[in-house]
Image (spheres, rainbow, N blue to C red):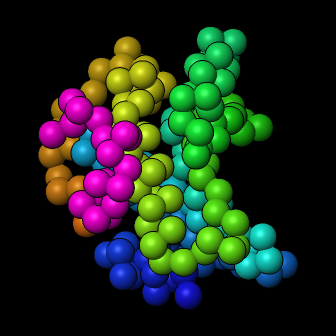
């Protein structure tokens, strides 16, 4: 079911992993600014779906400031959850209860994750690259899942970054 919905959205997930009735798929999505956003979809049919995105690699010693930033974002983006993994990687998650689980809501959740990552691109650049300097050639290739933002971006207009191309 979920794989066919992703296909309808023009997205190709990596392999499917299953354990104890819970399935997971990995995707790599591109926003207008943020490219290569690694997203995992975790589906427990009895509970719902979690769309889980790695915002950056493990953070260094400045975690206190980072925690305050994540808490602020939790307040500013009410349909998303920000946290830190056990190894220090900041993540962004959107949860869908099983009663809302359909192709449209999955697409909306994926677009929400990408648009939030786009919106926070400048604030997360120092987490991604030393000095926050964008590598040469970054974003030169065509974005993956372009149709996702075209289809769902208008419904999430409050998240569209005005500085995005």
Q: Picture coordinates of residue 46 (x, y %)?
A: 80, 77
Residue 29 lies, in percent from the top left, at: 38, 57
Is 152 contained in the magenta span?
A: yes
Where residue 30 appears, as percent x and y from the top left, is 32, 52
- Figure check: 141 above or below 148: above
Does 125 sit left or right of 98 as displayed?
left
Q: Which segment did they paint magenta? A: 148-165
Image location of residue 138, percent across then percent down? 23, 39
Dividing the picture into quadrants, the one containing residue 17 is bottom right
Q: Is residue 4 magenta?
A: no
For this view, does 140 lie left or right of residue 132? Answer: left
Quick one: quadrant of the N terminus?
A: bottom right
Q: Quadrant of residue 59?
A: top right
Query: Is residue 36 visible in the rendered structure shown here?
Result: no
Residue lying at 63% horizontally and 36% vertically, measured from the top left: 82
- Among all residues in the image, which is located at the extreme right? 20
Say which residue appears at 54% left-offset and 29% top-offset. 76
């Amino acid at each position: 079911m979920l794989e066919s919905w992703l296909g309808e959205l023009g997205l190709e997930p990596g392999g499917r992993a299953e354990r104890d009735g819970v399935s997971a798929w990995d995707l790599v999505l591109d926003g207008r600014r943020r490219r290569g956003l690694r997203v995992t979809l975790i589906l427990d049919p009895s509970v719902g779906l979690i769309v889980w995105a790695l915002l950056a690699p493990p953070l260094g010693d400045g975690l206190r400031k980072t925690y305050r930033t994540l808490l602020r974002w939790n307040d500013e983006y009410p349909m998303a959850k920000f946290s830190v993994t056990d190894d220090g990687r900041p993540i962004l998650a959107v949860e869908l209860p099983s009663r809302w689980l359909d192709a449209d809501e999955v697409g909306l959740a994926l677009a929400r994750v990408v648009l939030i990552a786009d919106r926070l691109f400048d604030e997360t650049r120092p987490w991604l690259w030393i000095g926050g300097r964008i590598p040469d050639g970054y974003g030169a290739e065509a974005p993956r899942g372009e149709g996702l933002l075209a289809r769902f971006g208008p419904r999430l207009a409050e998240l569209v970054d005005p500085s995005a191309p």
